[in-house]
Amino acid sequence: MAEELPQRQTDIGPPNYKDFLPPVIKNNYGKWKYHEKLSGGSMVHVGESGDELYTVRVASPRLVSTDFIRDLTAIADKYCDGYLRFTTRHNVEFLVSDKSKVDPLLAELKEKKYMIGGIGDGISNIVHTQGWVHCHSAATDASGLVKVLMDEFADYFTGAKELPARVRLAVACCTNMCGAVHCSDIAVVGIHRKPPRIDQDGVKKACEVPSTIASCPTGAISPDPKNKSVKIKDEKCMYCGNCYSVCPALPISDPDNDGVAIVAGGKIGSLRSDPKFSKLVVPFLPNNTPKWPEVVSTFRNILTAYEAGAVKHERLGEWIERIGWEKFFELTNIPFTHQHIDDFTIARETYRTSAAFKW
Ligand code: SF4
Ligand code: SF4
């Protein structure tokens, strides 16, 4: 076995995660025998040594206050020797190595109204991005959408209701997709629908023309020497907002035309079937704040049809592939539109084909 290299101290990159592992994980690293779910928000890992690690999971709103973090760390100090972790889906996990502390921990979390859950066949917390709070190119809000969806589907998080398998939800507020939208069971992605506007004076003052032109993946931007600015060919623009990241004088946000698309059927895991990319389900829904009723009812439709039709352990994408996308649109009452047809240059790859024809 290769010898582990000595750890060098540098100021580049994150510190080694192994420095932060709870002792029970360090001692049983790679030697876990099994794990099992105890409730909607707790599970136990048992090592070959007989050691046990209890995990208690709660939701977090992701954009959190220092008071919230202080409270989490105080709870972790009290019950888990200070050990907790944040999961990739913004759940918080308290890692308890002393079984006698699990029930008191659960009692305190309940008393403080933390939402305990996210383990097993239901939804976990919704991985999401910055939204209007923080990012320049957001076409929708992330925190607002997540709040309404989690309010609506809380029972699937806490374990009060179960689904056939785990359902991972995600929200990204633009097509840069900082959230895991491309590989989640159901996800929302913010979309712009108009080309950026050009602030000629701003381009002159704040932007580098060659890098602005180079930032456009479709070649829609060209120089405008007369105005010392740039021109945009509208018909070539796909409203991605890349140019706005490079040149702040090309704003793309538009309250009347921005909104969201919904995609479904993705997954990361390779259990039973290969990982899958999500596919477009609804091309556009408006930003009907603060409750996004159209988005919530679309999620409800998809989850209800999936719950009724899928077999145990079948992920949403696997269920759709088994029944066929035509049936999926029929069961969910979602209209099939021209936007669902992939007309990208290499679309051929995504068509179902037989020796005779594509459809
Ligand atoms: Fe910003 Fe887009 Fe990422 Fe949202 S998804 S945080 S708008 S880059
Ligand atoms: Fe090009 Fe995207 Fe800017 Fe449109 S929004 S001009 S496609 S970089």
Image (tube, helix red, strand yellow):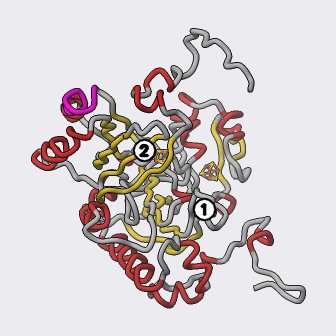
Mark 2 to mark 1 CA distance (whole Å): 22 Å
Specify which label sits upstream in the sequence, 2 or 1. Answer: 2
Q: What amino acid is labelled 2 in the image?
A: Val
The numbered dot on residue 46 is 2
Task: From the viewer's perspective, tell me whether residue 67 is left or right of residue 223.
Answer: left
Q: Residues within 10 Å of mark 1 (few under 14, many from 20)?
A: few
Where does the image place residue 328, in percent across and percent down from the top left?
53, 84
- Seen as rendered, the residue at the extreme top is 9
> Splitting the image into 4 quarters, where does residue 358 fall?
bottom right
> Splitting the image into 4 quarters, where does residue 85 fall?
top left
Who's the residue at 58% across and 10% down the image? 10
Q: Is residue 333 above or below residue 134?
A: below
Task: Report the residue marked by disc 1.
Answer: 271
Task: From the viewer's perspective, tell me whether residue 231 is left or right of residue 244.
Answer: right
Range drawn in magenta: 74-81
Q: What amino acid is labelled 1 in the image?
A: Leu
As helix, strand or loop, the secondary structure at mark 1 comes to loop
Who's the residue at 40% across and 65% down the image? 121
- Tell whether label 1 touches label 2 (CB within 8 Å): no
Who's the residue at 65% across and 38% down the image? 212
As helix, strand or loop, the secondary structure at mark 2 comes to strand
- Seen as rendered, the residue at the extreme right is 355
For the residue pair 159 and 10, the one nearer the viewer reads as: 159
